[in-house]
Amino acid sequence: MTTETSSSTSTANTENPFLEIDVLSLQFIGHLGRGTYGNVQKAKWRDQLVAVKIIENDSERDRKSFINEMKFLRTLVHPNIIQVYGACSRPKIALVMELMENGSMHDCWSCVLFRSSQGRTTVDNFPTISLHLFNYKADHVFSWSRQCAGAISYMHARNYVHRDLKPPNLLLKNGYRLLK
């Protein structure tokens, strides 16, 4: 494992497929959520906000599998795939990645109530639904679909299959307009 010294995080990560990040370089800010494999924390790293996924089960086999997956994920450069900056390997395995400040598609849909005047669930009022302060229209949903399809196509072209594609894993940012 090597340590990256470049401050650029927007370019392809093929020169250094594994970036070891010292956990002491992270300033933890708060809890974002809990996933299948552990907790996700909000942190500051290199003057930017990041998400840090802390893996709970860190057996040697899981550690090796995680490092191999991390090396591959750092080679994926697509506007609709979350950028992986690197990982911490001690004291626990942790993935440091782009922060998606608007949460997941699941969170988005959970906030929206489709209610008709009879109280039944419906999509009659779908064309303009207010979500927090953001009004989205059917065009936004089509845009999210195109973005998701583009990312999946990109991954499939590299013989990679996302085996856990579901609304909680579709994340949003930039005022709910960008899906990754």
Image: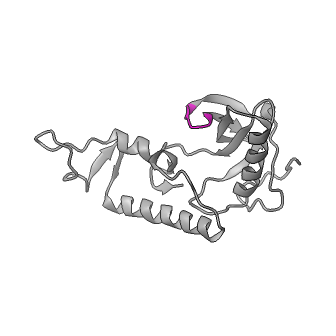
Q: Is residue 169 visible?
A: yes
Q: Residue furthest left?
A: 118
Q: Residue furthest right?
A: 2
Q: Is residue 145 above or below residue 170?
A: below
Where, by quadrant of the figure, is residue 21 drawn?
A: top right
Q: Is residue 43 above or below residue 139?
A: above
Which residue is at the front of the view, 114 or 132?
Answer: 114
Where, by quadrant of the figure, is residue 110 drawn?
A: top left
Q: Is residue 105 above or below residue 162?
A: above
Q: Which residues are magenta?
A: 32-38
Residue 139 as seen in the image, left or right of residue 65: left
At x 28%, y 49%, the residue is: 129
Residue 93 as seen in the image, left or right of residue 114: right
Coloration mode? one colour
Residue 62 rendering spot, x and y as whole percentages: 74, 41
Residue 92 as seen in the image, left or right of residue 133: right
Residue 19 rendering spot, x and y as whole percentages: 81, 48
At x 69%, y 33%, the residue is: 57
Residue 83 rendering spot, x and y as whole percentages: 66, 53
At x 10%, y 40%, the residue is: 118
Residue 72 rendering spot, x and y as whole percentages: 73, 57
Q: Is residue 40 visible?
A: no
Q: What quarter of the picture does the C terminus occupy?
A: bottom right
Q: Count all numbered tags in the image, as a single digit.
A: 0
